[in-house]
Amino acid sequence: MKRAIALLLAVAVFGLAETDSIKVDFRQMGSNYYAYPTPTAKYTKVPAGYKPFYLSHYGRHGSRFHQPADHYHALYNTLAMADSLGKLTELGKSLLERAKYLDEYAAPRAGDLTQLGVAQHQGIAKRMVTNFPELFKSDAYVEAYASTSVRCVVSMAAFLEELRAQKPKLDIHQESGKYLMSFISPLDFGKIINESNTPAWQKENEKLYSHVNTDRMMRAIFNDSNYIKKNVDAGDLFSKIYEIGNSLQGSPEIEFSFDDLWTEEDLTARWHAQNAWWYSVLGNNPFAKKQGLDNARPLLKNVLDEADKVITADTPKADKTAAKPAKKTTATLRFGHDTVIFPFAVLLQLDNGSMNTGIETADMENLHKVWRDYEISPMAANVQFIFYKSAKKGSPILVKVMLNETEQKLPVTCDSATVKNCPAAPYYRWDDVREFYRKALP
């Protein structure tokens, strides 16, 4: 069935779109449905004498099926009704076939991790061991915590499965529980959305959606303009096609796409609006009170606190007669959601050279030039803090931060007047980093 549909579609292969000099892959316009790309960036040489001793991580679950299931049902039912009345074009009938398949295959799996989502976390885990082998020697102790969401638990399981495949002797503590949600995903996202939907934002949102033309797609699917006007909520159907269609990149076993429904102009305009929506809810949004950032402050505190614990435990004791210390944690892994990793990246004000996650701007028309959702939170997005130490007495602990396995610059300064040999980005003194980010906490 899937292969027959795929052959009938003859879907065009999408390349790169120019969005005001920013080249964007059509898959990236899937926003937070963008399937995690394999990183290609090279790492900056570690300062002489330093070796990693601890890694602190927060990762989003991997690619999942779209949710809720009602969206699949609504898409299929809308098209089936129109077809029963002879109101579908040939393209509409082809879409109906696809919608029927998804209603049967994907809807029962709504929100669940896909097999690609499993593979994404296995890949990240494998690269983590390859990039930082010092952290996973022998029976090193690793702590892993997951949101109570099943897709996060399965993401953690996939990640740890790969760690054990690479290093069978690792001592791994893993758990998921409601008490962990206090820092993994603490707030009600629906409440955050409502609070960010201010009159000022609504005006900006209307401007963006004024560029989104739903008419062309509706005429391509339905053969009767009066039927569309009386029976179809064009904006709602357009959005469901956008969301469901973009989620398909996370399920390569489904051998069709919705690419033939889009023009470059349609998809670009819709993504611009989607990108701005994420920014308005979980970014440094000047049109609201920025409550979304509060969803990541407990995580930031947890990262800082846990790092301090590990560093304290790692400091040699003067009393050599003291009892043997408890096993030292070499990695803390956390598995959660985009609703936390977005504001977490914003609080950190990460800079990859072409985008600063913490930027504040009122220019929603050009937001995509300086803030892009798919770079921050694709499926399996992750932030990693890697800590380094030197055997040389008096040497400061250093840290670098990576977003999606790419090194980032931090808004942290080192006082060269009082500190000898301030490190160069992406390496920073932990004392400077801790002091700067503690100020972002209540």
Image: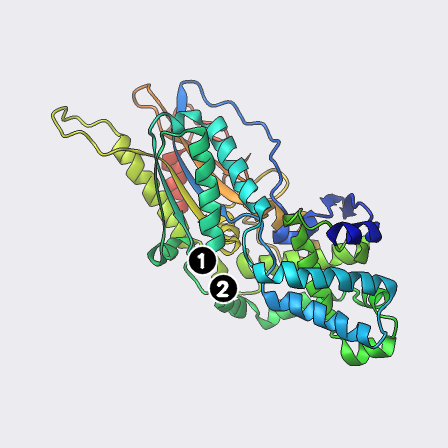
Residue 310 in sight from this viewpoint: yes
Residue 208 in sight from this viewpoint: no
Vertical order, 196 against 13 (above or below): below
Q: Quadrant of residue 200?
A: bottom right
Report the residue at 51% width, 56% height from top: 339
Vertical order, 378 against 75 (above or below): above
Q: Amino acid at mark 2?
A: Phe
Vertical order, 319 against 158 (above or below): above
Q: Amino acid at mark 1?
A: Asn
Badge number at residue 189: 2
Say few, some or many: other residues with alpha carbon within 10 Å of mark 1 (under 14 / 14 to 19 / 20 or more): many
Say few, some or many: other residues with alpha carbon within 10 Å of mark 2 (under 14 / 14 to 19 / 20 or more): some
Report the residue at 67% width, 70% height from top: 74
| Residue ID for mark 1 | 295
Q: Tell me, yes or no, whether the two marked residues, 2 and 1, touch with CB atoms within 8 Å.
A: yes
Q: Name the foreground residue: 388 vs 235.
A: 235
